[in-house]
Image: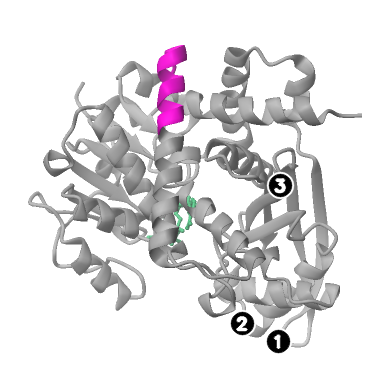
Amino acid sequence: MAYKEPAPLIDKENPLESMMSRFNIAAEILGLDEETYNVLKAADKQMIVHIPVTMDNGKVSVFEGYRVVHSTILGPSKGGIRYDMNVHLDEVKALAAWMTWKCAVVDLPYGGAKGGIICDPTTMSVGELERLTRAYTLSMKDIFGPDRDIPAPDMGTGPREMAWLLDEFSKTVGATTPAVVTGKPLVMGGSLGRTEATGRGVMVSALAALAKLGMDPKATTAVVQGFGNVGSWAAKLLSEKGVRIKGVSDISGAYWNEAGINIDDAIAYKNVHNGRLEGFVGATPMDPADLLTSDVDMLVPAAVEDVITEHNAPFLKAKLIVEGANGPTSASADAIINEKGIMVVPDILANSGGVTVSYFEWVQNRQGFKWSLDMVTERADRIMNDAFEKVYETSQKYDIPMRIAAYVVSIDKVAQTYKYRGGF
Ligand code: NAD
């Protein structure tokens, strides 16, 4: 089929509906009874807070913040905190449920949660951000806790915010409590290997998928969309395995080199150009809308949600999609992708290397002991490979796509645990 019109790059669907449509298919395959279905589908808890913060100009602004705990059936809930103007309760609910399935698919003893504050961190001073983070932490003090709910960074937050959160929480309980949050600075209990963990997991699961497809990484071509933490690490580690990365993109545009982009050069370039690839001379600029439909074997969407949609899915040429981002494929594209026979390593599996090493951070904090980078990497790779194998076997057993298989594995584990624990 000829590619006629450039497809819109982003076509947002309601993430909660997208997640639920896959959940429903998996629940039906598992023959989930109505009672368990109702328990797993709804979030346990939703906290909405209004936080007054004195801004630098002396005026008080009130910020709306959320924490949604979707499930604690497998253990304390785990999930990041997002600072963004587009934070929406429905999205936070979807992301919290995704965390439940993600932790379950890699067999971590965690449930799922997510938080967010409607704010624009790019226009706020460091002092304003610190006051906002401390006030949010205080308002969530009865939800957070190393055995209850363990936050982490997400869009708009990083190690700095996690350090404030740890400090404020520790004050409220009167004891330094590093295991209450992950993604901390290395000097205050962060884990070695956390920075590259998600990109590394993307690489490990991509290699596992290529092996199933009988494809040699050294003869494989790819494009990576998004060149931030996940995209740049995935691109670097995949290229070290011999994959030829022909195209990369970020918010500044898309860049192509038929012979393969030198990823170390691209990373070095963005590091001294405000984190952006704009003006990179090792590749030629191309239309970003064409990146995902270009003629390569593998796509690694590692930027934002809903970039593979019913509009561009008919034109995909790749044989494999490895989802570094959360929710890069809208539910409306699933049927088209399946019909084309494209293998998808879904987000809840492909990008779970990050939460896996966050779990290691929490374990180290509780042990009061620091692991070597080799130990972190070896254990994380093993977990990723085991999870991939389990999802692949499930997809073969039921003759279903890998995405639904990942949901089947997760929902089955949470449902079985619920049966043992019971309700009221
Ligand atoms: P980041 O902020 O470090 O990088 C995002 C990148 O995407 C940047 O290069 C940005 O320029 C680019 N980008 C933004 N909009 C784009 C667009 N429309 N087209 C092309 N590029 C665009 O973020 P990150 O931590 O790398 O996260 C990326 C994705 O991976 C998100 O969906 C996130 O939820 C998911 N994720 C991240 C982690 C983690 O450990 N960082 C873990 C699991 C999932």
Name the residue located 27 percent from the left edge and 55 percent from the top edge: 237
* Mark 2 neighbour class, 10 Å CA radius: few under 14, some 14 to 19, many 20 or more: few
Q: Residue at x 62, y 61 (%)?
A: 362
Name the residue located 25 percent from the left edge and 73 percent from the top edge.
Answer: 268
- Residue 91 pos. (x, y %): 64, 44
The residue wearing badge 1 is 56
Q: Amino acid at mark 1?
A: Asp
Q: Position of residue 138 (x, y in %)?
A: 82, 70
Q: Secondary structure at mark 1?
A: loop
Q: Which residues are magenta?
A: 389-400
Instruction: Indicate the secondary structure of the residue bearing disc 3.
Output: helix
Residue in front for this viewpoint, 150 or 69: 150
| Residue sitting at the far left | 259
* Magenta stretch prevailing secondary structure: helix
Q: Nearer the viewer, residue 233 or 74?
A: 74
- Mark 2: amino acid: Ser
Q: Secondary structure at mark 2?
A: loop
Q: Which residue is mark 3?
A: 89
Q: Which residue is mark 2?
A: 125
Picture quarter containing residue 158?
bottom right
Please tell me how many numbered marks the rendered image carries. Answer: 3
Q: Is residue 416 visible?
A: yes
Q: Please report whichever mark, 3 or 1, sits nearer to the chain's N-terminal start.
A: 1
Q: Report the colour scheme.
A: one colour
Magenta-colored stretch includes residue 288? no
Mark 2 and mark 1 in contact (Cβ < 8 Å)?
yes
Point out the tag, 1 or 2, that comes first from the N-terminus.
Answer: 1
Q: Residues within 10 Å of mark 3 (few under 14, many from 20)?
A: many
* Neighbours of disc 1 within 10 Å: few (<14), some (14-19), many (20+): few
Q: Is residue 14 above or below residue 147?
A: above
User: The N terminus appears in which quarter of the rendering?
Assistant: top left
